[in-house]
Every structure is written in C-alpha cells, then in structure tokens.
Image (cartoon, rainbow, N blue to C red):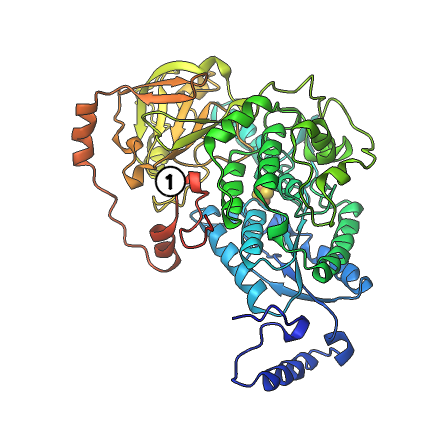
Amino acid sequence: MVNETEKGLSRGLTNYGDKDFSLYLRRSFAKAMGFSGESLEKPMIGIADTSSSYNNCHRNVPEQIEAVKRGVLAAGGLPMVFPTISLAETFLHPTSMMYRNLMSMDTEEMITAQPMDAVVAIGGCDKTVPAQLMGALSANRPAIQLITGPMMTARHGGERLGACTDCRRFWAMYRAGELGDEEIVAVESRLATTAGTCPVMGTASTMACIAETMGMALPGTAAIPAVHADRLRAAEETGKQAVRIAAADLSPDKIVTEKSVENALRVLLAIGGSTNGIIHLTAIAGRAGVRISLDRLNEISDETPVLVNLKPSGDHYMEDFFSGGGLGAVLREIKHLLHLDTMTVTGETLGVRLEQDPGYIDPDIVRPFAEPHYPLGGLVALFGSLAPNGAILKRAAADDALFESEGRAVVFTSPADLAERIDDPDLHVTPEDFIVLQNAGPKSGYGMPECGYLPIPGKLARAGVKDMVRISDARMSGTAYGTIILHVSPEAADGGPLALVRNGDHIRLSVSERRFDLLVPEEELAERRAQWKAVDAEPRGYAKLYQDHVLQAEDGCDFDFLRAV
Ligand code: FES
C-alpha cells in the first residue's frame, strides 16, 4: 500500500522490510542521475511522455515536455519525465480502441507506483486523453491534462484540407470515379501536414474540449494549434499549475463529479462532438463513480443546440475555432445551462473562470445560442427491439430525409465480410435499403473498430448516392458523417438482437420516437436465437483479458474490474 502521508521521493517506497534503507537506496540511485540532495527535496511532478515514432499526432510532445519542465522548475518543483504507451489511430491493429483501457492501466499504475506529488499527462490523439483521464481518476493523485493540440490545415488546389473529414470526402469521390489515381496520391500527401491531432471536431478535439470543460485542463487550452507558440506557453503554465495542485492536494475526485460530467455532456452536444465522445466520457465518469444514462443524454440533447460550425457537421477547422473564441465562447453561450460551482484544476470554479474577458468571438464559428448552427444537440440515443440497451446517431451530421424511414436489411456478418462484398457488382442493394454490419462490437475480436461509417456500395456510390441508413455495433471516426447508427447494444457477438438480422428483414427507423426496430415476428426471432452460436475464438494475452472483461458501449467499454460504479 502507498502511504499517502509521504511526499516527494519518500512516497510509495520499494518494500525491503526497512523503510529507512528503502529511502536511502532510492536517494542513492536518484543521485546516479545527477540530482542534488536539494533537488530531491522538492515536490516531484511526473510528466507522462506519450511521444512515439508511431504517433504523428504527438510529434510535438518532446518540445511540450521541455516547456512543462520550465514551468515546474520555475514554480519550485522537480520535473520527472516517464514514458507510458502511446496510441495513434492509424498505426494500431485491430484498432486503437482496444488499447485505450491498457493505456489507462499503464497511466494509473505508473502514477501510483512511482513517487510523484502531481502528474502532467500529455495526450492528444483520440484514445490517449480518455485513457489518461481514466488512469488519473483511478490513481486520484493531483493531475492536470495537457493537450498536444490540433494540426494546421493544408491546401490542395484552391481547397483547404484537414484530416480526416476531407480524407473521407476525397476517398468517396475516388470510389465514385470522380478522382483519378494521380490526384488521390497528391491528396494523400496534403491531408496531414503538421504535428498535432485531426483539425476538425473529431474525437481528439472533442476529448480536448471535454477535458477542459470538466476542469482537468487549463482554461483556453483545448483548441490551441499544436504548432502555435501559445501551445508552449500553455505547457509552461501547466507545469507551474502542477506544482500548485500538488501543494493544495487538488485531486481529480474534487474536479470530476456528477455536475462536471453533466457539463461535459452538454458541451459534447453543443460542439457537435464525436460519437466516440459519449463512450469515452462514460468511461471517464465511471472511474469517478458517476453513471451516464442515455435517457439523460436525450433530455440534454433536446435543450442544447450545436453552436460550433466545424467539420464534420459544419464548415470550419480547429484553427478557426481557436481564433474565433474557442471553448470559452461556447461555455459562455450555454452558461445558463451549466453547473457553475464545479471546481477546476486552477483552484477556481467554472463560474469564476467565465467571468473573465471572453476576447474576440467570431459568430460564424461559435454561433449565438439564439441562432445555432443546428437547433438540437448533435447526438441522440436510439432504443428499440434492435438495441434494447441503446445506440447512437449523430443527427447533426446526417441526412434528416432518412430519419423517418423503413428499409430492407442488407446484412454483412463481419468487417471482413463487408470488405469482401460491399463493392460486388452483383450485390442486391438499392439506395432505400438499410446496410447492417454485425460482429464489430467490443467482444467481436475486432475491438469495436471505426468501421461503422459503412461505405456506400460501389455501384450506388458511382450512381451518385451520398447517404443511406447504416447500422452496426461498431464505432465511427469523429470526423465522419452520414445517417449512421452506431454502438448497437448488446452487440451481435454477445448474442444481441443485431445478431438475428437476416437479409431481406425490414427495419423501421424513427428518430422522432428515438427508436429503430426489427420488423420480424417474435416466434421467428426465438427460432433464430435458438440457432445462434457465439464466434469460436481463442484469444491469448491482452486480447483475452479484453474479451473477458470489456463492457458494452453504455458502460463506456471499460473493463468490469476498473469502473467505480
Ligand atoms: Fe490522431 Fe486523428 S489520427 S487525432
């Protein structure tokens, strides 16, 4: 057990059965790194280093670490950099989502096992910020989140490009035959051209806004571009603040509460945030003992309009959001709906923070509450016979002409089946059909990949079809768009109703009623249920731990033994 009354180097001594010997030995080995006795007396501030050659979004972490160290030293602390695993979206198989819980465990264990009085967690790419917040909450040592920041946009011809909404737009054009091989290669080199995270309101930007709203990151820091000098000033200030929260023992349990989680949920809707945001926020809240209900999400969604005009549901990019007012402008517009007495890592409440000068606000980027970008919240939860425990639709990025519709199911039994047959010229599919993907959920062995943005079948895409109803137990990138129903729970691999859908079945969608139902008689479903068999898989190592313990989307896909609810 860690003795929480000890501080600095004396915290959590290695157990040799003699406490004084343990400290003497630790000091001696610390001195091998050139630290003076005086330095070793200072508050120790851990800095979680998530730089990696496999993570383009964290390319600026080394220079951020230098700036954090400056801040820690200036405030009288001793900066101690330590590595944790790093997760980059496009470099991980089967998907980064599978490793979020592993990174959260790594973060928690390294915070509690090593002597530190506070920690600065540097993250940015989609899964890293949720993992660090989950780990920090479970460790409950004073912690502050530093964001790597969004990348800058680039140009192709006369157009601005930003990963990855434009990645998908250009790829859809290429699939439809509107773009040649040479041009798609040119676009590939221009989609992501600087350090930082995807520059739209995708998952990384959403989670940065959530971290700041909950009070775990410094005010005004969520949207600063990765390459902007303000990003380094924010890092330096974060280092200073880490020393202060160590002295004040301002632990995350005083910051992440039911009220701050509800504020974050509201902001998720007001910014038109990623569908992944609801899974991650549920997981983070769960570590603090707070449960998020999808019914509450629907209530909040109906009273919180989308104010931020950013891709994928709007027109602009993160650098515009930063210069057009940033998260502070959003918080002020929805101030009347927020809990203002929530504590932040500055030691001040959210209400006090919002009394400060708002600076310049561009009303085209952060719309006034009375003239929103979209009149309702971006996300809505659906229930029904196909998803008794819920599913998610990003209505702000969907075609509302499809919101009240009935269609014939065209079923794919796995992501592999989808990849093999979606472009088959003989696929029997029309634009009115509903495309259904099974076995892509948390326990499927695919690790709930971001393949819920099911491609429009090749022959329909070439005929100009832009959107169709698509249903799965997978996730989708926060940068994607379309009438896409995700996170269907219980998932098919766990025997949920989604597993029982067959080609030609009819499905009815009603967004106004928050329902989607499989129109198949119960006797027929009972027969199919009796025949259903779980996929026979024998994973080993971490994959086995994952399969045995991962929870469904409504519990944030956390492990059952890590949640505090
Ligand atoms: Fe890292 Fe998009 S790939 S944020």
Q: Is residue 542 left or right of residue 343?
A: left
User: Residue 562, how many percent across, how many down?
Assistant: 45, 54
Say if residue 163 shows up in the picture: no
Residue 101, compared with residue 308, is above or below; it is: below
Disc 1 crowd rating (10 Å Cα; few below 14, some 14-19, many 20+) is many
Name the foreground residue: 161 vs 507.
507
Residue 363, compared with residue 262, is above or below; it is: above
Residue behind label 1 places its C-beta within 8 angstroms of ligand 1:
no
Q: Amino acid at mark 1?
A: Gly
Q: Residue at x 65, y 32 (%)?
A: 338
Count how many numbered circles sit on residues in the image: 1
Q: Residue at x 31, y 25 (%)?
A: 385
User: Residue 506, how many percent across, how many down?
Assistant: 29, 18
Q: Secondary structure at mark 1?
A: loop
User: Residue 317, how many percent across, how many down?
Assistant: 68, 31
Find residue 14 and report its image quarter. Answer: bottom right
Q: Is residue 470 left or right of residue 107?
A: left
User: Residue 544, how many percent across, how many down?
Assistant: 34, 55
* Ligand 1 positioned in quadrant: top right
Q: Residue at x 43, y 24 (%)?
A: 456
Say if residue 382 shows up in the picture: yes
Name the foreground residue: 389 vs 238.
389
Find residue 510 and report its image quarter. Answer: top left
- Residue on which disc 1 sits: 441
Name the foreground residue: 6 vs 188.
6
